[in-house]
Structures are given as C-alpha cells and as structure tokens.
Amino acid sequence: MRHVGALTLALGLALGLVACKGDPVKCDQGCRNFATLVYWKTADAEIAAAPADQRDALRKHHLGKFESMLASGIDTCVSQCKSAGNTETIDCLIEAKTGDQALACTK
C-alpha cells in the first residue's frame, strides 16, 4: 500500500522538525501520536470505502502494517526528536487529535 511509504516519508520529514531535547518520554509520545493519526487517517478512509464484508479483514491487514511500520521507525524518530530543539512542535504533535492536526504541526 503506497500510503505506508508516504507515511514513513512524512514521519521522516517530521523528525527533523520535531523536538524534545533530552526528553525521550515526550518524544516517544509525539512520534507515536503523529504516526498513529496520520496512518489511520488514510487507512480508515480506505476501510470505510471497502465493501462491508471486507472491512474486518482490511482493518486487520492495516493494523499489522501499522505495527510493523511503527516498530521499525519509532527508535529513529525518538532519537532525532531528542537531538532537535523545538519543544513547540513536539507539544503540538502530542496534543493533536486528527491526522490533519498532526501534519499541520510539522509545517
């Protein structure tokens, strides 16, 4: 699915912009919230558009993809976040409630 690659790229770009210098807990929260909101924004739309009898299987498929993507990228995100110095952005990412809000934090 191409949105997985796009999310990974977006998360990578956001990493250079987020900050949480010296605070791995806040960095982890911000990285996880960003990845979750942005990934599921696209995945939920795809699931909703699928025929009703295929939605459960599609949701399970996306859950597996998301967990794999998160596991492979969270350490890098947290590391880059800790090295940056923009606490305003990480606070924005933690407070975001939608994928659009999370993406807006990185602009």
Image (cartoon, helix red, strand yellow):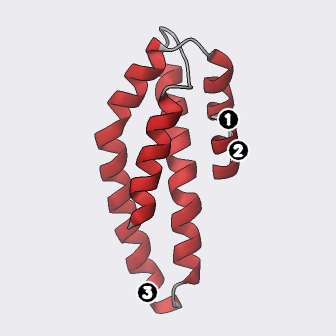
Q: Residue shown at 47%/8% (left/top)?
A: 22
Q: Distance of mark 1 from mark 3, alpha carbons?
A: 34 Å
Q: Are marks 2 and 1 in contact (CB under 8 Å)?
A: yes
Q: Is residue 61 above or below residue 80?
A: below
**Nearer the camera: disc 2 or disc 3:** 2
Q: Is residue 61 above or below residue 22?
A: below
Tell me which amino acid carries mark 2: Gln
Q: Distance of mark 2 from mark 3, alpha carbons?
A: 29 Å
**Nearer the camera: disc 1 or disc 3:** 1
Residue 80 at x, y percent in the picture: 42, 21
Q: Dot 2 corresponds to which residue?
A: 101
Tell me which amino acid carries mark 1: Cys
Camera-nearest residue between 68 and 6: 6
Tell me which amino acid carries mark 3: Gln
Q: Residue shown at 38%/20% (left/top)?
A: 79
Label 2 secondary element: helix
Image quarter (top left, top right, bottom left or bottom right) of the C terminus = top right
Check residue 92 in the rendering and tell me which mark sits there, or answer none: none
